Image (cartoon, helix red, strand yellow):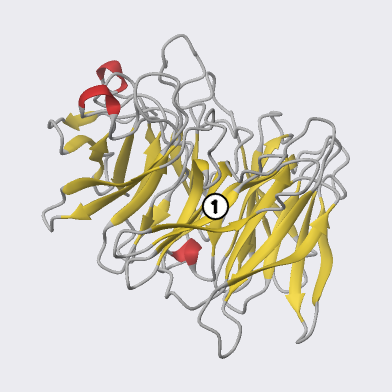
Amino acid sequence: MRLAITSLAAAAVICAFGTAGASASSLSLAYGFCAKKNCVDGRNSDSPVSRDASGNLYGVTRFQTLGNSQRGILYKLTANGDGTYAYKTLYKLCDMFNKRCNKGSIPNGRLAVSPAGDVFGTTYRGDGGKADGGVVYEFTGDGKYNALFKLCPNCTTPLRPVAGVTWAGAQFGTSWDGIAPLYLVARNDVSGIPGARIYQIAKPKHKNKFKLAEILASDGPIAALTVDLSGNLFYDVTDDFHGGIFKLSFNGSNWVNTQVWTLCAAHTDCNEGKDPRALVVDKTGNLYATSATGGDNKNGTVFRLAAPNYTSMSVLHSFCIDKPCSDGVTTPFAAPLAIDQTGNVYGATSDGGGNDFQTDKSGAGVIYRVGTDGSYTKLYSFCAVADCTDGADPLGGVTIDDAGSLYGTAFEGGPQIGSGEVFRFTP
């Protein structure tokens, strides 16, 4: 059922709605990109936002200016305490078409923000090497940008980060403490040459500087990576066949790699889904994941693997039950999932929702919740107001805070000429 819009306020609450017997939910605007002349504040973000301990938001945009300038911007939204935010550009990255660009270009994925205000992130390109791979960078609290690590600058094929960095507790909205190890995935970016690597960024004992260490080289492309509260890593490998989910555990001297599930192994018609994408682990160790294809309707699924052995699999939802896909459609992006304090899982799709977006009849995406009982609920359909000023295509997934509010980015729509936005959603 389509939810009725009950309020609209410029630059604050975009829309609020409710159903009988349910508390009101609202989507509000934290910032609309391209609010400044020539979009010097950035536009079109497909990356998540990160929160620090004070509730400030940090993120990146892929583009800068109205032209095809793929520099990208690192930005901060300072919480004013009344639900509004003050925007600040922290750093403008190098243009990927500049041959001298060797400190990172096209920032992407999740950021880690320390209590001191130091920001760690990744770029898709710009290492200065012959393969022009990605970079891990640091933007310090006193305003200095440092390209810390180049991801295999002498490789024959470029290695490029796919989802930024993550850490234990990121899925619950826990801010990075500046000490816990960070992890990232970089994939080969040449057609027909699969493969990926997982890296750890950590400070060795009695050392002050972070070190980058490769902990796994995979023959297949990795879509997503998550960390449980015990420090175990889970990742999914997607391929043209079905895909699988793996666990990495550190035994004190080495990382042990174990495959815990092969998609379509239990159901030959692949109604559990195939081609896994987003992945997250809850406080009890249960795994939740999305698939890009397969399922009862061939439009992807949300499924759960039960801890501790991961031998029990439950399909929680097959997308696109109602035409035109008003419940959403999983797309081939690993948009982050989030988990609240009671164990509910939240996510976003960039297609479906039932609202026409430009000429795309599949819609502009939804925010959804998977309850601890396995129930699926569509919470919001984007592009619910004129000209999609409430946003469209939430490619950055969702981040959660302690109160259960969700934060994310919409790549399209927004209040400024389709340049996207940062939103806050209260379930």
Q: Is residue 47 visible?
A: yes
Could you tell me residue 123's position as x and y percent? 54, 46
Q: Is residue 356 above or below residue 425?
A: above
Could you tell me residue 22's position as x and y percent? 28, 47
Q: Is residue 273 visible?
A: no
Residue positioned 29% across, 64% down in the render: 142
Residue 21 as seen in the image, left or right of residue 296? left
Nearest the viewer among 93 and 333 is 93
Could you tell me residue 6's position as x and y percent? 18, 31
Give neighbour class at mark 1: few <14, some 14-19, many 20+ (Cα, 10 Å): many
Residue 243 as seen in the image, left or right of residue 394? right
Residue flagged by tag 1: what amino acid is it? Answer: Gly
Residue annotated with mark 1: 164
Q: Is residue 288 above or below residue 298?
A: below
Residue 365 as seen in the image, left or right of residue 374? left
Outermost residue on the bottom side: it is 206
Nearest the viewer among 384 and 255 is 255
Could you tell me residue 79's position as x and y percent? 19, 56
Outermost residue on the front side: it is 100
Nearest the viewer among 66 and 15 is 66
Residue positioned 48% across, 78% down in the render: 179
Q: Quadrant of residue 73?
A: top left
Q: Quadrant of residue 177?
A: bottom left
Residue 166 as seen in the image, left or right of residue 58? right
